[in-house]
Image (cartoon, helix red, strand yellow):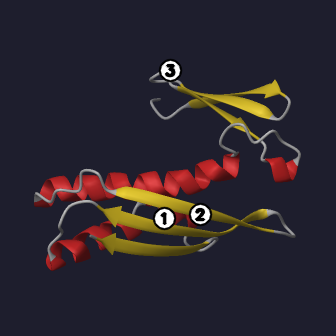
Amino acid sequence: MNNQIEIIYEGNLRTKAVHIASGSELLTDAPIDNKGKGEKFSPTDLVATALGSCMLTIMGITANVHNIDVKGTKVKVEKIMGTDPRRIAQINMEIIFKSQIRSKDKVILERAAKHCPVAKTLEDNIEENIKFIYL
């Protein structure tokens, strides 16, 4: 299976995740506000990051199909934690396009972003506020 990930607890609230197919690794720490060091992404940071990365990837796939230049597009992500229970309550994002995008292509890209697999997975559980910024 290409989609396997192995996660090892290294102690001191740090984990190491290994993507089996590629050998790529990433570390996580518990955040400072939850007894951690906050020296790496937290697991909830990765959820918010996954949303932004997924949207960019799906927009990239769509842009390739429609011959739209989205190179340099940037996503700024803000994760807001809720309490009782402690969970991600809200993710605010700004998707900032570096190149000029035609009006009809904006509709195509925005629709693609909002239908990425991570957005569809989270949509009923986390408030997603997405702002598209065209320069």
Which residue is at a point 83% across and 42% down the rendered structure image?
36
- Mark nearest the camera among 1 and 2 is 2
Number of the label disc, if any, that sits on residue 78: 2
- Check disc 2 and report its element: helix, strand or loop: strand
- Report the residue that reaches farthest toward the top: 23
* Residue closest to the eye, 52 or 37: 37
- For disc 3, the marked residue is 23
- For disc 1, the marked residue is 119
Marks 1 and 2, Cα distance to the nearest angstrom?
15 Å
Instruction: Specify few, some or many for label 1: CA neighbours under 10 Å numbering under 14, 14-19, or 20 or more.
Output: some
Instruction: Specify few, some or many for label 3: CA neighbours under 10 Å numbering under 14, 14-19, or 20 or more.
Output: few
48 horizontally vs 32: left or right? left
Instruction: Please tell me which of labels 1 and 3 falls first in the chain.
Output: 3
Q: Is residue 118 visible?
A: no
Percent x, y of residue 101: 18, 69
Percent x, y of residue 65: 14, 56
Callout 3, which amino acid? Gly
Which residue is at a point 38% across and 56% down the rendered structure image?
74
In the image, residue 91 sits, relative to residue 8, either above or below, namely below
Which residue is at a point 17% across and 79% down the rendered structure image?
103
49 horizontally vs 95: left or right? right
Percent x, y of residue 92: 55, 70
Callout 2, which amino acid? Glu
Marks 3 and 2, Cα distance to the nearest angstrom?
29 Å
**Do tag 1 and tag 3 residues touch (Cβ < 8 Å)?**
no
Instruction: Please tell me which of labels 3 and 2 falls first in the chain.
Output: 3
**Do tag 1 and tag 2 residues touch (Cβ < 8 Å)?**
no
Marks 1 and 3, Cα distance to the nearest angstrom?
26 Å
